Image (cartoon, rainbow, N blue to C red):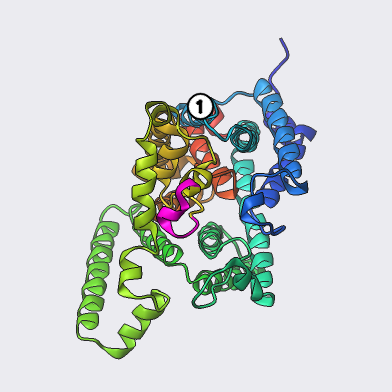
């Protein structure tokens, strides 16, 4: 029996380094604007689809090799593998087998490689994996933001009416705002001197991207993340922190009541700000959540349409094909179910929904057991994980974080979920 590699050997091993390179490549290939093609060609094989498949298959092979040498176990890992299995089962009865299998291969590659990296990383390296995600995301955000600013005609080609929103026609304004919100809160690491100044300049840029994306979802999740972060920071102080958290709750409630009163009094500046926040949309558009309240009943109808699809789903990543089979019912193109729970139920059925529910509960460990996790995790990783959980949960109300296809957000979700299992292991391993 071969001896288990030491921490130093794992971190300096070519397999780990190659795994990080491939992980970054997966982020780039699945998380940024690289080409434009018509909706009708969305499921056809082209150079980008081939590159994604090749990279993820290679990533899956690397992940399996790493996991053979160093396994990782725990409820979080089990829930991720259960979701991966449910996504595979969704291909059994779908009418869209080829794209579903393709999307599953992408998901499997990203998930298995992430599991392998977490299994091989000691605590400092876990921080390195997390910050690598943040750095790569920042680069992709800046690149997409520049394309959106320099080529506003892309929004017109995308067929979007109304005010210009940064990201439309490139990735998507909501995706751009979501990524910027995540990167902003992940940037809060220990830093001194020049690095600290540069990080604050970066945060200003990321806030600007969130604002220019004009994504209500991103703005709300950004604010909620800030509140949760402040709450958790004060939870470390038994008495003083209790008073500060009470003040935080009271202050938030007071601001909400004040804004409601000013709106009811039609105070011009406040009304103008509310109109800007709602992208000058009419009241009916706002209450319909920009068409989401029309998509949700259709998605529910599709979920309940057949016993087989109720259990197994219509196929991982197939929501846009399923929802637009009756496009005349909506009158517009639905890219997904615009709700993560509905998306998961629609694409992976009851099996995937149960696995997703388990993942949410287990991800919440970063918040529910924050003090314990913070005592174990390196350099504020627990705080950032809890903030990421907040952003993803808020975002999942009107967008699909999982169930559509592999992306940087999925990799980050799996990373934190599996890292939480490391805290359960023996003290020797927990020390890295």
Image side of residue 40 versus residue 228, left or right: right
Question: Which region shows up in magenta?
Answer: 325-333
Q: Looking at the figure, which quarter contains the N terminus?
A: top right
Image side of residue 229 versus residue 33, left or right: left
Image side of residue 229 versus residue 122, left or right: left
Magenta run includes residue 328: yes
Instruction: Return the residue found at the far top.
Output: 1
- Which of the 4 image quarters holds residue 328? bottom left
Q: Is residue 238 above or below residue 274?
A: above
Helix, strand or loop at mark 1: loop
258 or 178, which lies in front? 178
Residue 80 position within the rendered picture, expressed as x and y whole percent measured from the top left = 50, 32
- Which of the 4 image quarters holds residue 138? bottom right
Q: Is residue 319 above or below residue 418?
A: below
Q: Which residue is mark 1?
A: 93
Residue 54 position within the rendered picture, expressed as x and y whole percent measured from the top left = 75, 37
- Identify the residue shown where x is 59% and y is 72%: 205
Q: Looking at the figure, which quarter contains the C terminus?
A: top right
134 or 276, which lies in front? 276
Residue 245 position within the rendered picture, expressed as x and y whole percent measured from the top left = 27, 60
365 or 7, which lies in front? 365
**Can residue 371 be spotted in the picture?**
no
**Can residue 262 be spotted in the picture?**
yes
Image side of residue 164 versus residue 238, left or right: right
- Identify the residue shown where x is 69% and y is 76%: 150
């Amino acid at each position: 029996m071969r001896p288990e590699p030491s921490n130093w050997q794992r971190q300096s091993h070519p397999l780990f380094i190659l795994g990080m390179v491939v992980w970054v490549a997966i982020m780039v290939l699945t998380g940024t604007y690289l080409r434009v093609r018509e909706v009708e060609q969305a499921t056809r094989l082209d150079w980008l689809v081939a590159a994604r498949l090749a990279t993820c298959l290679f990533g899956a092979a690397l992940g399996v090799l790493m996991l053979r040498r160093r396994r990782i176990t725990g409820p979080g890992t089990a829930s991720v593998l259960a979701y991966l299995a449910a996504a595979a089962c969704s291909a059994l009865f779908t009418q869209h087998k080829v794209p579903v299998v393709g999307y599953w291969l992408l998901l499997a590659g990203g998930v298995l490689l992430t599991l392998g990296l977490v299994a091989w990383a000691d605590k400092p390296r876990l921080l390195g994996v997390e910050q690598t995600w943040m750095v790569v995301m920042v680069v992709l955000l800046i690149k997409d933001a520049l394309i959106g600013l320099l080529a506003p005609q892309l929004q017109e080609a995308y067929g979007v009416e109304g005010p210009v929103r940064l990201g439309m026609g490139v990735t998507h304004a909501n995706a751009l705002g979501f990524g910027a919100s995540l990167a902003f809160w992940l940037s809060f690491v220990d830093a001194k001197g020049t690095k600290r100044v540069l990080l604050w300049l970066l945060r200003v840029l990321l806030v600007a991207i969130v604002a220019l994306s004009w994504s209500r979802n991103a703005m709300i999740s950004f604010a909620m993340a800030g509140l949760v972060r402040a709450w958790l920071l004060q939870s470390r102080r038994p008495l003083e922190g209790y008073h500060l958290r009470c003040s935080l709750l009271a202050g938030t409630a007071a601001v909400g009541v004040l804004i409601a009163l000013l709106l009811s009094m039609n105070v011009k500046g406040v009304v103008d700000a509310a109109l800007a926040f709602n992208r000058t949309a009419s009241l009916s558009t706002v209450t319909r959540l920009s068409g989401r309240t029309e998509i949700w009943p259709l998605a529910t109808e599709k979920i309940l349409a057949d016993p087989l699809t109720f259990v197994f789903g219509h196929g991982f990543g197939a929501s846009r094909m399923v929802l637009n089979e009756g496009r005349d019912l909506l009158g517009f193109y639905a890219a997904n179910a615009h709700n993560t729970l509905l998306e998961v139920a629609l694409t992976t059925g009851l099996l995937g929904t149960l696995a997703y529910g388990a993942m949410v509960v287990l991800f919440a460990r970063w918040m529910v057991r924050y003090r314990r996790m913070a005592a174990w995790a390196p350099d504020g990783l627990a705080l950032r994980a809890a903030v990421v959980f907040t952003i993803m949960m808020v975002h999942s109300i009107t967008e699909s974080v999982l169930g559509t296809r592999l992306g940087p957000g999925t990799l980050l979700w799996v990373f934190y979920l599996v890292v939480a299992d490391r805290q359960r292991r023996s003290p020797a391993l927990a020390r890295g």
